[in-house]
Amino acid sequence: MKVKIPIIRRATQIFAFFWANSFWNVFFTGRLYKGPLKGTCVPFLNCHGCPTATFGCPIGTIEHYMVIRRFPYEIVGQLGLLSMLVGRMACGWLCPFGLLQDLLFLATKVEVKISHAWRHVRWFVLIGLVIAVPWITAEDFFSKVCPVGILTADLPWLLWNPLDPNTGKPMFASVVVWAIAINLAILAAILVLSAFIKRPFCRVLCPLGHIFSLFNKVSLVKLEVAPGCDHCDACEKVCPMGIKVYEDPNSSECIRCLSCTVCGNVKVGSRRLVPVEQVWTIRKVTPEGAPSEAKGAGDA
Amino acid sequence: MSKSEGEATEVMARGGRLGQWNVTLRVALFALFFGLLLHGLLIGNVFENYQNATTSWMDDE
């Protein structure tokens, strides 16, 4: 029996949510998990301020290091290695916020298309809000307005508002109203947009997706389009990012969800880290210029 | 060597150079990120991340 990719993908997205939020003890103690796992990160946005969070958020961690003005060696290495292996696949297969946007879009029948040029805004978010502003002001600015943080940390804490174990009083006796209002407006705007635009947060704002996307063209997992593709745009219809895969199979927007492989012309390929026989063939043939022996030399 | 053979050779050579460059880049990036990860783990800065993560910034107190 062949299991369909979208079903497996939904299962992994749900699993990822529970994997990253498995500290149920918080409901008995009212205390966040602060063990060693919090020092590592999941490869998707999941606020470490969420009551049940077991791991750190990669963007929150990067911001933290910018605030203390140190280089985040471990997290950059971790994200870089993952990106080199699978590109932006974590966005498509693991991110719970991506799942939420997918489901909201599927719930409506109306699609509003936006230009792919909006992806450049992610540079501003990553360089400006995640790196530069925290470095200069010593404030983790993006974390304060991150919609994932609002949804998974701020809202649950505020709605629950447990007694503080140290003082015995409610944890949020007095809150900054304007901060909550701004946060809720940001979250509401993104969720409403998600109902009509395919993954607006991932396409326009997500700094983590932007880091991953930088490696789509060199990652070991890649997509290939057969020469027989007739540009029917079936791939664009099923793509959660609205990409015409035949235009650029390894586009920086592709989240490697593999939905487009329902079309027989799109295949998942792989690059080898060091294709030994290819290097050998190039070395042997190029100086002598014999085209018949240079097979496979063009593939990277 | 005919003209078409010469063109084919040139295309193959260009592809070969591109392929070699990509392989070099890929290996270098893997080595770089592995080194960063290892260094981060060895100096132990990983465990100081957000040990006290809360949403307290919204708290007025």
Image: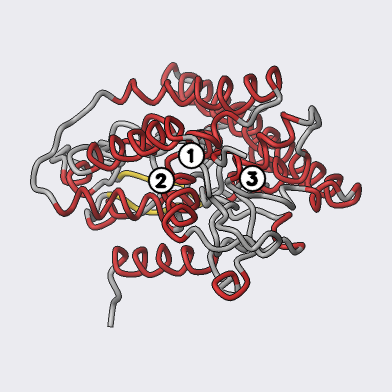
From this viewpoint, which residue is outermost toward the right?
B43
Q: Earlier in the sequence, mark 3 or mark 1?
A: 3
Q: Image quadrant of residue A261?
A: bottom left
Tell me the number on the disc at residue A229. none
Instruction: Look at label 3 and name its amino acid.
Output: Leu
Disc 1 and disc 2: Cα gap in Å?
8 Å
In the rendered image, the vertical position of residue A203 relative to residue A272, given as above or below: above
**Which of these two is toward me, B49 or B19?**
B49
In the rendered image, the vertical position of residue A29 relative to residue A144, given as above or below: below
Does the image show residue A293? no
Dot 1 corresponds to which residue? A209
Does the image show residue A179? yes
Mark 1 touches mark 2? (CB < 8 Å) = yes
Disc 2 and disc 3: Cα gap in Å?
15 Å
Same chain for the residues under marks 3 and 1 in the image: yes
Dot 3 corresponds to which residue? A79
Question: SS class of the residue under badge 3?
Answer: helix
Tell me the number on the disc at residue A255. 2
Residue A266 image point, x, y percent: 30, 50
Mark 2 touches mark 3? (CB < 8 Å) = no
Q: Earlier in the sequence, mark 1 or mark 2?
A: 1
Identity of the residue drawn at 65% across and 27% down? A139
